[in-house]
Amino acid sequence: MTGGPNPIVNNYSRHDESSPLISKHTNRHSDNSSGSSNSHISANDCVSQIEEEFEVHDIAPSIDIGDHEAAFSLRKLIRFAGPGFAMSIAYVDPGNICSDLHCGAVAGYKLIWLLFLTHALGLYIQTLSARIGIVTGQNLAQHCHRQYTKRIRIPLWLICELAIIGSDIQEAIGTAIALYLLFGIAVWKGILLAASLSYAILGIQRFGARKVEAILIAMIAVMCGCFGIEVLMAKPDFGQIAEGLFVPRIPANAMVQAVGIVGAVIMPHNLFLHSALVGTRRIKRGSTVRHASIREANFYTVLESAIALLFSFTINATILIVFADIYSMGNGVDPTGLRGALARTAEAHLPGLLEAAGLLEKAFGKAGPLLWAIGLLASGQSSTATGTMAGQFLMEGMMKLQVSPWLRMFISRSISLVPTMLVGTLATKYLDQFDEWLNVLQSLALPFALIPTLKFAQSKGIMTGDFALGPYWRAFGWATAAAIIALNVYLLLPLVLQMAVQSMVAAALAYTSFGVYLTLVGVLVFADVE
């Protein structure tokens, strides 16, 4: 496969004399060449030295942010807008859509507050990864390469790659179901066609970051429009929606769905993606303006990310509300008896992405499944594009493997195609159970992206003293990580105990896998960084 490096993937901000990385390299060079007539090294030589070490390329021009401005500027916010919206795509992928409809079906409006909380938590975590990219000029994967030995780095990379492949499978299934609903294409054919459609979006990357960002924002607008219209058609009780948003509670029969929200919403590869995409914005790093420029970039990045995740929350909430309305008798009229029948069988059988279209048709007529399919198609294709970019950042940054994005997608899709095709051809009715297990995979992989993010963000050596996490935010971050790990143990332990009673071999495999998982998490927690 031919083709140069991805112009978006390799489009990072350049360093200057004030960068802590350049200072480090200057000192190292001076130490190594003491007594030599060539002991002086210029800033340009330092830049070349760093770029050679980290294989940073500047194929496409960065997006110039301009000079620092003391007052708020809408024009500058628009210049920063893009990376946060690309990041937010992972929050509305087909896996999240499936999780939303299950939450609505089982718990009604009662889990809207938890959905909002996970998005707020996601904003905090995404902000940390973005700050790493802005302050240091290097993304999360590159810092993993610098800070960890191969014994840590290789398992870390494999786990994160596995999570990306799992996400790729969900996106392929979602796209295939959308194509079936729109054009009657068989699911297995839709899976193959989904892989082909992904290359069309990938090709737009050659025209620069702004073009890709514009398409992703358009996809978000399509999802908002389609699912928003369905909410208006459902005519829900907005008083109950407000109660679900502001009164925290988890019904006893919805504990699994509540845990699933966390696993579905916060995606591990998204941290690598966001920390790299902010590098497409070129900020002033001269010694006199560096501190103010970085603070300005952090402010606008947080604001843009908050706006983007507000749209993502809106999309997820609309899906939850629509299916809460369909599955609940509520206070409205139920002339067809559909809501009453569904309410009696909700716990016995939850709908998947395909079955959901049939329910929408019964509730809203032909417009229901049409809007559902268009929104699902936008979700599947947009999340495939961002997943491919995240994989490219991860592979090049952490392992220094320079692979064309076309080849990268081909490898990822080839690996994910085998299990997806098997399910799509031989066990179509198990697509949704398959999707639920993939959400669990994302939750299990999340600590392997979150823990390095926390350790790097709190390091004064990496972030410099002014931008390292303070004690309160550091405590909040580690409390969040501990809660996520505890949720994963909650998910894994029943499965381990269930396998343990089947046979000695199954018990040994289950306990060994559980022990290895906890050991890897512990290694990351206690590994030394700068």
Image (cartoon, rainbow, N blue to C red):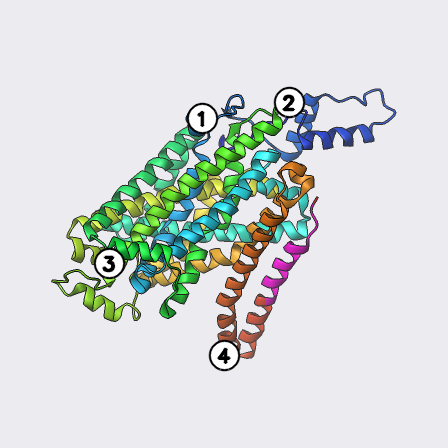
* Relative height, residue 408 to residue 342 (above, below): above
**Residue drawn at the location 50% of the way across and 63% of the way down:** 487
**Badge 1 or badge 4: first in the primary sequence:** 1
Quick check: 47 left or right of 319?
right
Labels 2, 4: front one: 2
Expressed as whole percent of the image width and height from the top left, the position of residue 357 reads: 23, 55
Q: Secondary structure at mark 2?
A: loop
Q: CA distance from mark 3 to mark 2?
A: 57 Å
Residue 485 in the image: x percent, y percent? 55, 60
- Residues in magenta, as a range: 515-529
Q: Amino acid at mark 3?
A: Asp
User: What is the quadrant of the C terminus in the image?
Assistant: top right
Which one is closest to the eye, mark 1 or mark 4? 1
Q: Nearer the viewer, mark 3 or mark 4?
A: 3
- Residues 504 and 122: in front is 122
Q: Are marks 2 and 1 in contact (CB under 8 Å)?
A: no
Marks 3 and 4, Cα distance to the nearest angstrom?
41 Å
Local crowd at mark 4 within 10 Å, few (<14), some, or many (≥20)?
A: few
- Mark identifier at residue 73: 1
Question: Mark 3 sits on what residue?
Answer: 325
Residue holding disc 4:
502
Q: Are marks 2 and 4 in contact (CB under 8 Å)?
A: no
Q: Earlier in the sequence, mark 3 or mark 1?
A: 1
Q: Earlier in the sequence, mark 3 or mark 2?
A: 2
- Give me the C-alpha separation between circle 2 and circle 1: 21 Å
Cα separation, mark 1 vs mark 4, equals 63 Å
Residue 343 in the image: above or below residue 122: below
Using the rendered view, name the quadrant where residue 524 is placed. bottom right
Q: Amino acid at mark 2?
A: Thr
